[in-house]
Amino acid sequence: MDPIDPPPVVEKNPGLTLFDAVFDLSFATPITPRVVKWLYIISIVAAGLVALSKILSGFSAGIMAGLVSLFIAPIVFIIYVLVARVTLEVALAIFQMADSLKKIERNR
């Protein structure tokens, strides 16, 4: 399994589309493994926009504040992206554990 691909999830209703899974009131079909790549992309874009806005607001406050924000913004960007990545990986690990437990339960 490629480390970028989400883990395989055993679904009760594998034929459901993402839209159907969102409104599945029985929560039989998890959607997190399906949308994790998009959530990560959104996190990267959001972190980039925040970093850019901090740099621009720093330079609008003055040259010294701009230089400080030019140094600090990339560090904050990296930290934000790392936190988002780790959070999403933890969520995927939980789904992998749930799948493994379901397999163990079925084999008993």
Image (cartoon, grey):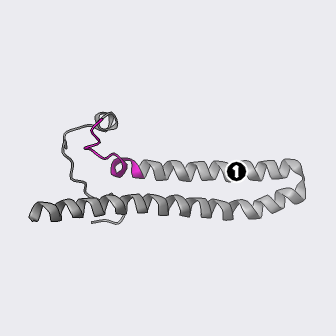
Q: Is residue 40 left or right of residue 107?
A: right
Asked if residue 4 is positioned above or below residue 57 in the image, the reply reads below
> In this figure, which residue is indicated by the disc labeled 1?
52
The local secondary structure at tag 1 comes to helix
Quarter where residue 74 is shown: bottom right
Residue sitting nearer the eye, 27 or 10:
27
Q: Position of residue 76 (x, y in %)?
A: 67, 61
Q: Position of residue 37 (x, y in %)?
A: 41, 52
Q: Is residue 60 left or right of residue 43?
A: right
Give the magenta-colored segment's residue range.
25-36
Residue 103 lies in magenta, yes or no?
no
Task: Give the residue type that dot 1 points to.
Answer: Leu
Residue 97 in view in this figure: yes
Q: Residue at x 29, y 63 (%)?
A: 97
Badge 1 crowding class, 10 Å Cα cut-off, few under 14, some 14 to 19, many 20 or more, is some
Q: Residue at x 59, y 48 (%)?
A: 46
Quarter where residue 7 is shown: bottom left
Image quarter hosting the N terminus: bottom left
Q: Position of residue 87 (x, y in %)?
A: 48, 60
Q: Residue at x 80, y 48 (%)?
A: 57
